[in-house]
Image (tube, rainbow, N blue to C red):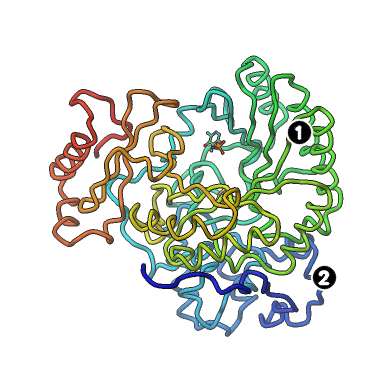
Amino acid sequence: MKGNVRVESEAHHQLKSGEYWRDLPAFESVSAQEFETHLFQQRHTVTSVAQLREVLGKVVPESFYADLAAGIANAPMALRISPHLLSLIDWSAPESDPIRLQFLPLRSGQKADHPMLQLDSLGERKDSPVPGLTHRYADKALFLPVDSCPVYCRFCTRSYAVGADTEFVGEKLKLHASLQRWENAFAYIESHPELEDIVISGGDSFNLKADHIELIGMRLLGIPHIRRLRFATKGLSVLPQKILSDHRWTDSLTRVVEQARKLHKTAVVHTHFNSPNEIVDITRRAMNVLVERGITVRCQTVLQAGVNNSARAMQLLVKRLGHVNIQPYYVYFHDMVPGVEDLRTSLGEGLSIEKHVRGVTAGFHTPAFVVDTMGGGGKRDAHSHEHYDRETGIAVFTSPSVKPGQWFLYFDPLESLAPDIQARWEIATERRAMIDDALREAGAGSGDPVACAVR
Ligand SMILES: *Cc1c(COP(=O)(O)O)cnc(C)c1O
Ligand code: SF4
C-alpha cells in the first residue's frame, strides 16, 4: 500500500440522501414519510429468498437468487435484512457491494473454513457464570438479554446463540428475553462488587422493548458498584429510522442516560458500522437527535475483506463516523467463526491499514485495532503479538491481565498464504509442527497451556 491514499477532503461530508429506495420495484411508490419509519422497516424486513425476489424482481438475474439460496444453506446465520440496507446496496454490481457482502451470502463467494475455526470462537459459554452473562474481565461483564437483532450479519460471532436455528449450526443456545433469567444475571452482578461496567448486548438492544431498556438500565444503575453501562446496538447502521420514529424507545434510552448522569455514572451507546456506505443522511439525522440529548455513541467495526480492507475505505469510515459524532473505538480482526472465511483478512494486512488510519484525525477518534483471541484471552492490541510468522500466517498472543500464563493464536486465511504452505495446513501433523514452531519462537515452554486445541 503505497502512495497517496488519503481521503479527498470532502468525501466524508457527502452523505447519500433523497429517495434512493424508489429504485427497487417494491418500494417505487413509497414516500419518505412512510419509508423513514421503524414500522415500515420492520414490516418489510426480508427474511427469505422469496421475499427478496418480491422486493427486487428483475433488478438482479435469476442466477443471483439461486446463488443466494445455496449460500444461505451453507451459512451459520439466517437471512434478515432491512429495506434501508437493501436500498443502499448497489444492485448494478451486487457481487462486490460492501453491504451485500455482510448480509447476503452467495455460494459462489464462500471459501473453505480454516482448519482451526470454531463455533463460539471466543469461548463465551465457558466464561458464563449464569446463562446470558459473560464475565471474563475483572471489572466488566457482557450481558445478553435477548438473542435477536433487527438484521442478521453473516459473520456474527454469536452465531452459536443469535438468530433462528440454521441447518449449518443446528439448535442454538436460547437466550430469549426473560425477566427470570435477567434477575439471575442481576443477582450475580450484585454479588460481585468488582464489576463496574456492564455491556448490554445480545442480540441487539434495538430488539429490547422500551420498557425493558428502562428496566435493565435503571436496575443496573441502582447497583452501587456499577459505574458504566453501554447499550450495544447495530441499529444506527441498519435501522436508524427507529431513533427518529420510535419515540418511546428513544425516550427510554434518554431517561437511562439522564439517570446515569444524575448518579454521576455513565450510560452510552456502542454501535457497529463496517462500511462508509452505511453512513447516509438519515444516519446523521438520527445521530443529531442523540447528540442533542447528550448521548455518547461509539463504534466497533469488524475488518472485512471487500468491505473495508483498504486504507481508503477505513479512512473514509473513520472520518464519516467522526462527522456524524460517532467515536471510532475498535476495529476487530475478524473472529475465526465458520462459514465466513471469505471475509477474513491476514493480520499483516490489518496492521498495514492501521498505520494508514492513525494520524488521519483526532487521536480520540482513532480506533484501536484488536484481535479478540480465540479461547477467551480477550481483546489484544493487534500490534502486541509476541510473534507473527507471515509465512505460515500464525500469530501468537498473551493476555497477562485476563488469562495469565496462557498462549493464544490467530491464523491468517489460507488464501493469503503461499501454495506450499496452504498444502501443509491440510496435514494434521504439519499443522501441529507449524504451531509448535510459532509458539517456540514466541517464547512458550513445551508444557505451557495453549488456548485452542489442534484438531
Ligand atoms: C468486549 C468485551 C467486553 C468489553 O470490553 P472493552 O474492551 O471494555 O470494550 C466485556 N466483556 C466481554 C466478554 C467482552 O467480549
Ligand atoms: S447485530 Fe451483532 S449480534 Fe446481531 S447478528 Fe449482527 S453481529 Fe450478531
Q: Is 455 situated left or right of 151 in this image?
A: left
How many numbered marks, from 0 up?
A: 2
Q: Quadrant of the N terminus?
A: bottom left
Q: Quadrant of residue 9?
A: bottom right
Residue plotted at (72% across, 75% down) = 17
Q: Which residue is mark 1?
A: 217
Q: Three-letter amino acid code at disc 2?
A: Glu
The local secondary structure at tag 1 comes to helix
Percent of width and height locating residue 450: 29, 30
Query: Dot 2, crowdedness within 10 Å: few (<14), some or many (≥20)?
Result: few
Q: Three-letter amino acid code at disc 1?
A: Gly
Residue plotted at (42% across, 56% down) = 355
Residue 164 is marked as none
Percent of width and height locating residue 100: 53, 68
Residue 405 lies, with reference to residue 47, above or below; the image says above
Query: Dot 1, crowdedness within 10 Å: few (<14), some or many (≥20)?
Result: many
Q: Is 374 situated left or right of 48 in this image?
A: left
Image quarter where ligand 1 lies: top right
Q: Quadrant of residue 423?
A: bottom left
Q: Which residue is mark 2?
A: 34
Nearest-to-viewer mark from 1 and 2: 1
**Distance from label 1 to label 2 (Cα)?**
31 Å
Percent of width and height locating residue 209: 77, 43
Residue 339 lies, with reference to residue 25, above or below; the image says above
The local secondary structure at tag 2 comes to helix
**Mark 2: C-beta under 8 Å from nearest atom of ligand 2:** no
